[in-house]
Every structure is written in C-alpha cells, then in structure tokens.
Image (tube, rainbow, N blue to C red):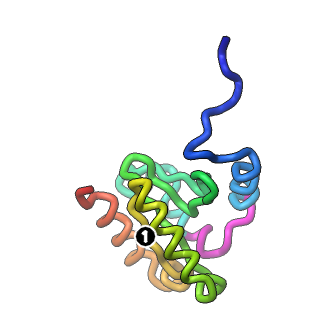
Amino acid sequence: MKNNHRNRIRGTTPEIEQAARNLRKNLTPAETLLWEALRNKQLEGLRFRCQHPVGNFILDFYCPSCKLVVELDGEIHTHQTDYDDDRTAKLVEYGYKVLRFRNEQVIDDLPKVLAEIRRVAFWPP
C-alpha cells in the first residue's frame, strides 16, 4: 500500500512545514529582494528554495544541488549570536555549506552578495 504522507526531511514536522509556508507569504524586504534574484534558476541555473524546512529549522534559502544554505540576518540576530552559531554548526554537521548576510548587505550591495553565493555554490565540497 502506498504511503500518502510525504517523506520528512531530517525530522521535519507538519508544524514546521506550515510555519515555512507562512514565512514564504511574509518575506522581509531583504528576503524579497534576494528571492527575486535567486528564483527561477536565475543565478547560474541554480535552483533555490525559499523558507525551506529542515528538521526544526527553516532555512531562508536553500540550493539542494550544492547543499548551500543562505541565511539573512535582521536586527534580532545581533542579540542571538550564540543561537545562530549553534544552528550553523548543526547545519554544517548535516553537510550543508552555510552563508550568512546581514539584511543591509543584501539591500545595499546585492551584486556582491550574489557574487559570494555564486563563489561558494561552485566551491569544491
């Protein structure tokens, strides 16, 4: 008999998946700007997912072909650096490459951000 439930990626729950859907509908200005540049394989043909659930995390942007996670940090992240560091370490344990940018970097210099994403995406594992 066929299983009607979708496979969960690294323990993802329906609640996390619903939260990801909600976040996709309410992107920050910086997330919207970056998503417009990444969506539809616009960056070197790489397919990115927006607000992608993995385990208990929701990744801002994720490229499965190169296991690249791109996280954008708003003001709240200046007060939660330990959490962000632990989260990054856990993602690296899973085998992901993780890039973090401040919202201001995306808004003020999108070409530089895209160049760094491109560089890391094609960097050997």
Q: Which residue lies furthest to the top in this view?
A: 1
Q: Which residue is drawn at 49% across and 59% down?
A: 38
Place of residue 44 in the rendered image (x, y in percent of width and height, measured from the top left): 35, 55
User: Is 115 displayed left or right of 80 in the figure?
Assistant: left
Quick one: 21 or 113, which is closer to the camera?
A: 21
Residue at 53% from the left image edge and 60% from the top image edge: 61
Please name the predominant secondary structure of the magenta segment in the image.
helix
- Residue at 54 percent of width and 85 percent of height: 104
Name the residue at 57% across, 52% down.
Answer: 54
Q: Position of residue 89 (x, y in %)?
A: 45, 67
- Mark 1: which secondary structure? strand
Q: In which quarter of the image is the C terminus?
A: bottom left
The N terminus lies in quadrant:
top right
Percent across and percent down for residue 123 are 25, 61
Q: Is residue 81 above or below residue 34?
A: below
Span colored in magenta: 25-33
Q: In this view, does 49 lie to the left or right of 41?
A: right
Left or right: residue 55 compared with residue 18: left
| Residue type, numbered disc 1 | Leu
Against 3, is 59 above or below?
below
Where residue 10 appears, x then y in whole percent?
A: 56, 46
Q: Which residue bears the numbered disc 1?
A: 99
User: How many numbered discs?
Assistant: 1
- Is 97 magenta? The answer is no
Q: In which quarter of the image is residue 111?
A: bottom left
